[in-house]
Amino acid sequence: MPRPTVVPHDACWSRLCQEEADELAEIFGEEVVTIHHIGSTAIPGIYAKPIIDILVEVQDIARIDAFNRAMVERGYVPKGEFGIRGRRYFIKGTEERRTRHIHVFQTGDAEVERHLAFRDYLRVHPEEARAYSRLKRDLVGRFPHDIESYMDGKNDWIKETERKAKAWIDREKKADT
């Protein structure tokens, strides 16, 4: 089982994400609608696991399994839906030493909005981002050898922040109309 590790924000993460996005666009070709940097590495100034999370929106999720071989050839491990219906999930690296998480969803899937709302909310609310950063550092200190307890410790905070992010996005949409 991998150990929980968080490190200070690295300005290189956005460049690494773009390089990976270019590679994914090459692999998935015409299926790609857009590619997003998500997760803690996409939120400036906070501690994060040094794993780049990328969300790829595609035209038809049912066609993505046909790209598994090309993904494997580029160092990715296909994981199927991996607990989220309608997703295709890939890791780069090994189970113990991952460098990338790739989340592929069909454009319009509610999971896309959930991930983007969480990221954007924390980008616009730095006090919340700092609270998340402190929580992660505290959990690593409490559970240095237990990734499951680390993840469980973040769960309630993430769910509450997702609720706030959804309400914030809904208010933003209303203000634009």
Image (cartoon, helix red, strand yellow):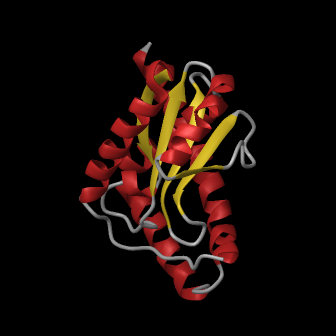
What residue is shown at x 41% (from left), y 17% (from top)?
A: 176
Q: Is residue 104 left or right of residue 19?
A: right
What residue is shown at x 31% (from left), y 62% (from top)?
A: 45
Q: Is residue 61 above or below residue 177?
A: below
Task: Look at the image and tell me whether residue 9 can be seen.
Answer: yes
Task: Look at the image and tell me whether residue 165 can be seen.
Answer: no
Q: Is residue 157 above or below residue 173?
A: below
Residue 57 spot, x, y in % from top left: 52, 28
Nearer to me, 32 or 68? 68
Report the number of discs: 0
What residue is shown at x 47% (from left), y 77% (from top)?
A: 137
Nearer to me, 87 or 72? 72
Nearer to me, 157 or 149? 149
Residue 72 spot, x, y in % from top left: 55, 47
Q: Residue furthest top?
A: 177
Quarter of the image with the C terminus is top left
What residue is shown at x 62% (from left), y 66% (from top)?
A: 154
Nearer to me, 11 or 32? 32
Residue 64 spot, x, y in % from top left: 62, 29
Residue 31 spot, x, y in % from top left: 51, 21
Quarter of the image with the N terminus is bottom right
